[in-house]
Amino acid sequence: MKKVIIGFIAITAIIAIAYNILQAKRQAGELDFYQLLNYNSAQQNMDSPSENNNGLSNNKFDQAFGLESDKSNAQLSFPGILPEEKITGKKVLITTNKGDIEIELFADKAPKTVSNFVYLVENGFYNNLTFHRVVPDFVIQGGDPNGNGTGGPGYSFPDEPVVGEYTEGTVAMANAGPNTNGSQFFICLSDLQTLPKQYNLFGKITNGMNVVHSIAIGDRINSATVLNK
């Protein structure tokens, strides 16, 4: 009986140590996209730009670590493709606590995504939200009302064909799988040639890339405004 108890204690201790190591690595951002390129191909890349809106978990680790499902209650709905004059020749000015970022919108390449982004900006959705994820030399990610990667606008919209490459300064939508785009977006911090073309690409930073590189987890979007080019 004594041996059984000792064995049980040893197993419990090993499990606890393993859990703490995984937690530490996860929080430190060590489980990044590049490590996971060779991870189980049947599992979605855990640290590719993703969101858990609509209660969808983007990986088994999220389930294991107990990330919550979508808690956003925004009374919004996907606007569809807005009139051409609302989305063509537009840019968005994002004012953060670190400085200003200008995004040129590609309405001709991603009309649904640009329409959605303009709609959310004009409704003040992004005001006072944070950048909840920063992976050096990879991406910064924001647009989650929950601030932890689980939130969205209360709806999702379809994927669009990706036209172009994920180069430094590219702006694209995060998702939790096919046709689960919502409000979370990411900005590439470098040229990501290995990133699969499954994230709606809808814009490019035209001013403020130095600000983008200075963003840290928890930095805030003070406001977002649609402007003419």
Image: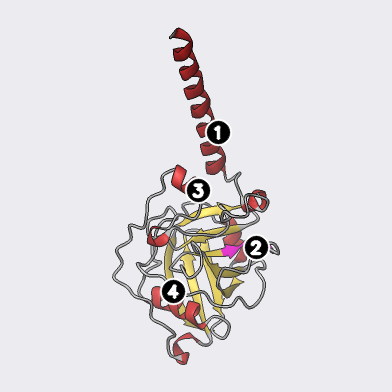
Residue bearing the label numbered 2: 195
Q: Position of residue 160 (x, y in %)?
A: 54, 77
For the residues bearing labels 3 and 1, Cβ distance under 8 angstroms:
no
User: What amino acid type should be assigned to the residue bearing mark 2?
Assistant: Leu
Q: CA distance from mark 2 to mark 4?
A: 21 Å
For the point 36% across and 58% down, the residue is 70
Judged from the image, the secondary structure of the residue bearing numbered disc 2 is loop
Q: Amino acid at mark 4?
A: Phe
Mark yes or no: residue 129 visible.
no
Residue 157's mark?
4
Q: Which residue is mark 3?
A: 60
Which residue is nearer to you in this view: 58 or 103?
58
Q: Secondary structure at mark 3?
A: helix
x then y, percent, for residue 12: 47, 24
Q: State yes or no: discs 4 and 3 in contact (Cβ < 8 Å).
A: no
Q: Residue at x 42, y 86 (%)?
A: 82
- Which sits earlier in the primary sequence, circle 2 or circle 4? 4
- Magenta stretch in the rendered image: 187-191
Q: Position of residue 87 (x, y in %)?
A: 48, 85
Q: Nearer the viewer, residue 137 or 94?
A: 137
